[in-house]
Image (cartoon, rainbow, N blue to C red):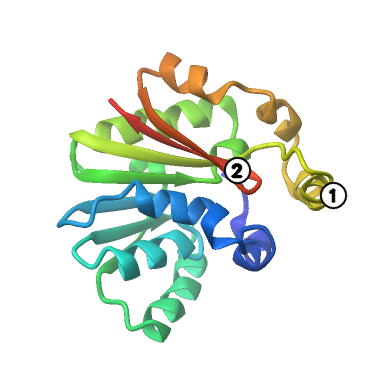
């Protein structure tokens, strides 16, 4: 798995640089795809928990589990919980391959900006494990980078390309809708956002 501690500061800047237009932010699209009722949410490879915090704040009835293999990253995230007086998030230090959760443990699973970071074999593991953990009536919400069209956004996106791993440019060429369908998912909804695309999947 990639070393997220090295780039954690960069990812915490996403909301001020890349996702600052709230109406075009993938985080807003993600929230709109999550029902406001008692649900169990898993944030896979949660890092500093930007998504987890946003969900916990806006979906008060949700119980959010933030999973990451880095204890240091999750410890950093916990400062956000206290700052925002959040009590409906639990953190678990574990590799997604060995989460230990029983099947159908969650109603919503978030896979945000992770698939492009890992090998093809690891992508399959993440998607397979997400399917195993997902309630039969639940959704997986995937956020992934997408090559922007405007010149200004292309300029800023060049920085993303510089820091992302080898193979990132090839990943950008993937037809993710077809990719998810080949992995056995139904693509229920897609939304184009700044620098990204958000997918809502079901089994």
Q: Position of residue 7 (x, y in %)?
A: 67, 60
Q: Is residue 152 visible?
A: yes
Farthest top residue? 182
Image-quadrant location for residue 21: bottom right
The picture places residue 96, in percent across and down from the top left corner, at 40, 44
15 and 152: which one is in front? 152
Circle 2 is placed at which residue position? 196
The percent position of residue 56, horizontal first and vertical second, equals 31, 66
Q: Position of residue 118 (x, y in %)?
A: 59, 36
Which one is in front, 39 or 34? 34
Q: Nearer the viewer, residue 174 or 133?
A: 174
Q: Quadrant of residue 104?
A: top left
Q: Is residue 186 left or right of residue 24?
A: left
What residue lies at 77% left-to-right and 49% top-to-bottom?
A: 153
Q: Quadrant of residue 117?
A: top right
Residue 17 is left or right of residue 135, and the answer is: right
Count the labels in the image: 2
- Could you tell me which quadrant the N terminus lies in? top right
Look at the picture and state if 75 lies above or below 162: below
Q: Residue at x 43, y 30 (%)?
A: 125
| Whether residue 181 is situated above or below residue 193 in the rendered picture | above
Near mark 1 (Cα within 10 A), the count class, few <14, some 14-19 or many ≥20, is few
Mark 1 to mark 2 CA distance (whole Å): 15 Å
Name which residue lies at 51% across and 69% down.
72
| Earlier sequence position, callout 1 versus callout 2 | 1
Q: Which mark is residue 155?
A: 1
Residue 135 seen in the current view? no
Instruction: Report the residue at 62% width, 53% height from top.
Output: 3
Q: Is residue 77 above or below residue 8?
A: below
Locate the C terminus and report the quarter of the image it occupies.
Answer: top left
Q: Secondary structure at mark 2?
A: strand
The kind of secondary structure element at disc 1 is: helix
């Amino acid at each position: 798995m990639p070393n997220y501690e090295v780039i954690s500061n960069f990812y915490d800047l996403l909301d001020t640089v890349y996702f600052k237009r709230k109406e075009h932010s993938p985080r807003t699209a993600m929230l709109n795809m999550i029902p406001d009722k008692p649900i169990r949410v898993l944030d896979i490879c949660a890092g500093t928990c930007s998504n987890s915090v946003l969900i916990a704040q806006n979906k008060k009835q949700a119980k959010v589990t933030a999973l990451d293999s880095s204890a240091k990253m999750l410890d950093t995230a916990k400062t956000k919980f206290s700052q925002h007086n959040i009590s409906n998030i639990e953190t678990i230090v574990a590799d997604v391959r060995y989460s230990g959760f029983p099947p159908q443990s969650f109603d919503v699973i978030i896979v945000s900006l992770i698939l492009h970071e890992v090998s093809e074999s690891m992508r399959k593991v993440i998607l397979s494990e997400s399917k195993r953990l997902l309630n039969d009536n639940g959704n997986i919400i995937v956020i992934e980078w997408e090559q922007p069209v405007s010149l200004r956004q292309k300029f800023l996106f060049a920085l993303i390309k510089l820091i992302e791993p080898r193979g990132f440019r090839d990943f950008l060429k993937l037809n993710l809708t077809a990719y998810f369908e080949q992995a056995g998912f139904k693509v229920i909804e897609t939304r184009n956002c700044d620098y990204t695309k958000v997918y809502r999947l079901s089994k």
